[in-house]
């Protein structure tokens, strides 16, 4: 019988989709979460905190494979260090990490923190897999909402957002495979100017708005204009476009309201 897979962040957006796929592959899952939750068939929740280093030994007892998705605005580097140390104590055999495209190129704290987390995994001495992904379509929604409301479009800012189901599919596949090191990045089907992303967002809501161009100053602006947040040619591409995502979202919202 195979051992359960520990998923940190299994209650989050990407995590929920990935856990469902691991369950569909007939694997038991243990989920580390900061809240207290009742277990379900095939899923056991263990309370703990990766940043504050709480509950990790209990969560990792008897675990061979860890999928580390837990993350927030701060502390992902510390969380990775705590998790790796606990994984060593527990004799884990495969560590899988989600990271972000541009982790080694974008001059922004979030990206630097993700790179530091990658390095913790790479130096762990435990066989590892790291998948860098682009921003999710879901992540671009609040950005499009704010830019539309403010009627501005930062010049040269592009995203190649990707569907959460496609990210989850790849993560489940990698978790169930042998350790692969840094595997090909995963991005959405196309890099799109934020002006076009907001226009499509507005159209999906049945309106058009004139957007004023805005210049992002400094090193961050230069990095975005140079496309340092975008995938290279070697990346895998998901199929779901931003427009398809918006159409699907509109259908779900209408159905949910009805
Ligand atoms: N969204 C994107 O566009 C994107 C792109 C590239 C990479 N990523 C990375 O993918 C990962 C998952 O993203 P997501 O969008 O699914 O995030 P999400 O929906 O915000 O979920 C965050 C998850 O992290 C867990 N978590 C946060 N802090 C924790 C802590 N200190 N200890 C234990 N668990 C903690 C939460 O669990 P509880 O609340 O249950 O404790 C929750 O399950 C993150 O690492 C994120 O940086 C996201």
Image (spheres, grey):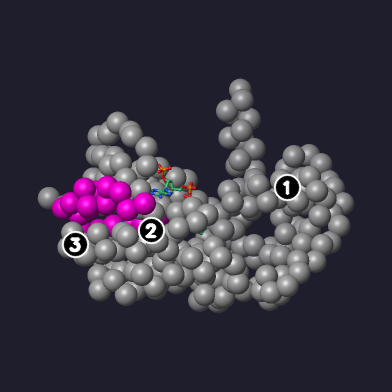
Does residue 4 appear in the picture of this structure?
no
Q: Earlier in the sequence, mark 1 or mark 3?
A: 3
Where disc 1 sits, the SS reads helix
**What is the number of the mark on residue 79?**
2
**Is label 2 within 8 A of ligand 1 (CB to nearest ligand atom)?**
yes
**Residue bearing mark 3:** 89
Asked if disc 1 is less than 8 Å from ligand 1, the answer is no
Left or right: 217 as drawn, with respect to 118: right
Instruction: Please report contact status of discs 1 and 3: CB closer than 8 Å, yes or no.
Output: no
Please rate how many residues cluster around mark 2, counting C-alpha atoms within 10 Å: few if below 14, some from 14 to 19, many from 20.
many
Quadrant location of residue 178?
bottom left
Q: Is residue 41 magenta?
A: no
Q: Is residue 66 magenta?
A: yes
Looking at the rendered structure, the secondary structure element under dot 2 is: helix
Mark 1 to mark 3: distance in Å?
Answer: 45 Å
- Secondary structure beneath dot 3 equals helix
The residue that appears at 69% across and 74% down in the rendered structure is 219
Quadrant of image for the C terminus: top right
The residue positioned 55% from the left and 54% from the top of the image is 136
Q: Is residue 253 above or below residue 99?
A: above
Return the x and y of residue 193 as percentages of the image width and height: 72, 63
Q: Give the residue number, with chain letter if any, for mark 1.
A: 146
Q: Nearer the viewer, mark 2 or mark 1?
A: 2
Q: Looking at the picture, how far across and down is residue 224, in whole percent?
A: 68, 70
The residue located at (31%, 59%) in the rendering is: 83
Residue range in magenta is 52-69
Q: Outermost residue, front direction?
A: 52
Q: Is residue 90 left or right of residue 82?
A: left
Q: How many marks?
A: 3
| Residue 177 point in image, percent of width and height | 28, 64
């Amino acid at each position: 019988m195979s051992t359960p897979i520990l998923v940190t962040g299994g209650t989050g957006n990407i995590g929920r989709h990935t856990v469902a796929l691991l369950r569909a592959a007939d694997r038991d899952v243990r989920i580390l979460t900061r809240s207290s939750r009742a277990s379900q068939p095939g899923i056991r929740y263990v309370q703990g905190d990766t940043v504050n280093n709480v509950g990790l030994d209990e969560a990792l007892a008897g675990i061979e494979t860890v999928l580390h998705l837990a993350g927030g605005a701060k502390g992902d580097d510390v969380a990775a260090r705590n998790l790796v140390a606990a994984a060593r104590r527990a004799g884990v055999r495969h560590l899988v990490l989600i990271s972000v495209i541009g982790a080694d190129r974008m001059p922004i704290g979030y990206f630097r923190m993700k790179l530091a987390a990658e390095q913790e995994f790479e130096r762990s001495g435990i066989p590892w897999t790291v998948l860098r992904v682009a921003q999710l379509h879901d992540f671009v929604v609040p950005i499009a909402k704010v830019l539309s409301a403010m009627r501005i479009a930062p010049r040269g800012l592009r995203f190649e957002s990707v569907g959460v189901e496609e990210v989850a599919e790849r993560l489940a596949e990698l978790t169930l495979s042998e350790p692969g090191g840094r595997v090909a990045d995963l991005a959405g089907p196309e890099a799109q100017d934020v002006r076009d992303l907001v226009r499509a967002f507005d159209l999906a809501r049945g309106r058009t708005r004139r957007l004023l161009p805005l210049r992002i100053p400094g090193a961050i602006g230069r990095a975005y204009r140079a496309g340092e947040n975008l995938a290279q040619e070697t990346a895998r591409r998901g199929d779901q476009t931003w427009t398809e995502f918006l159409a699907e979202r509109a259908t779900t919202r209408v159905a949910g309201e009805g």
